């Protein structure tokens, strides 16, 4: 199935515009190319509604897990770890 068929975007849009007192939508998907694609797809679909309602859209931080050896980390993981450093 493609992303459009798997994700219930219309239900999410209704909930966002349904008058609930939402401040933020946190997207949380698998740390994989498919998860990244789903994150991008949903962001694009709800961006306009969220902006009109002044709702922040964010994703969980990505990076290195505790105990991970740097030498076994791929470039994307290292890039995300640096980007999301605290």
Image: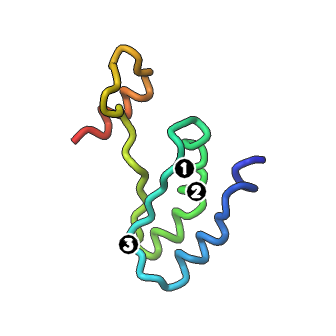
Instruction: Tell me the CA gap for discs 3 and 2.
Output: 17 Å
Q: Is residue 77 left or right of residue 49?
A: left
Residue furthest to the bottom: 19
- Dot 3 falls on a residue whose secondary structure is loop
Residue 85 in percent (x, y) is at: 26, 38
C-beta proximity under 8 Å, tags 3 and 1: no
Residue furthest to the top: 71
The dot on residue 23 is 3
Instruction: Tell me the CA gap for discs 2 and 1.
Output: 5 Å
Q: Is residue 75 left or right of residue 8?
A: left
Location of mark 1 (residue): 39
Identify the residue at image location x=41%, y=81%.
21
Quadrant hosting residue 63: top left
Instruction: Say few, some or many: other residues with alpha carbon within 10 Å of mark 3 (under 14 / 14 to 19 / 20 or more).
Output: few
The dot on residue 22 is none
Residue 24 in percent (x, y) is at: 40, 67
C-beta proximity under 8 Å, tags 2 and 1: yes
Location of mark 2 (residue): 42
Quadrant hosting residue 42: bottom right
Q: Quadrant of the C terminus?
A: top left
Identify the residue at image location x=33%, y=19%.
70
- Dot 1 falls on a residue whose secondary structure is helix
C-beta proximity under 8 Å, tags 3 and 2: no
Identify the residue at image location x=32%, y=36%.
83
The mark nearer the N terminus, 3 or 2, is 3
Instruction: Tell me the CA gap for discs 3 and 1.
Output: 18 Å
The mark nearer the N terminus, 3 or 1, is 3
Instruction: Say few, some or many: other residues with alpha carbon within 10 Å of mark 1 (under 14 / 14 to 19 / 20 or more).
Output: some
Identify the residue at image location x=41%, y=56%.
58
Instruction: Say few, some or many: other residues with alpha carbon within 10 Å of mark 2 (under 14 / 14 to 19 / 20 or more).
Output: some
């Amino acid at each position: 199935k493609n992303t459009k068929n798997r994700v219930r975007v219309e239900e999410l849009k209704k909930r966002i515009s349904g008058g609930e007192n939402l401040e933020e939508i946190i997207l949380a998907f698998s740390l994989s190319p498919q998860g990244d694609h789903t994150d991008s797809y949903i962001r694009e679909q709800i961006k306009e509604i969220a902006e009109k309602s002044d709702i922040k859209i964010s994703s969980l931080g990505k990076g290195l897990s505790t105990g991970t050896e740097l030498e076994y980390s791929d470039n994307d993981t290292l890039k995300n770890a640096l980007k999301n450093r605290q």
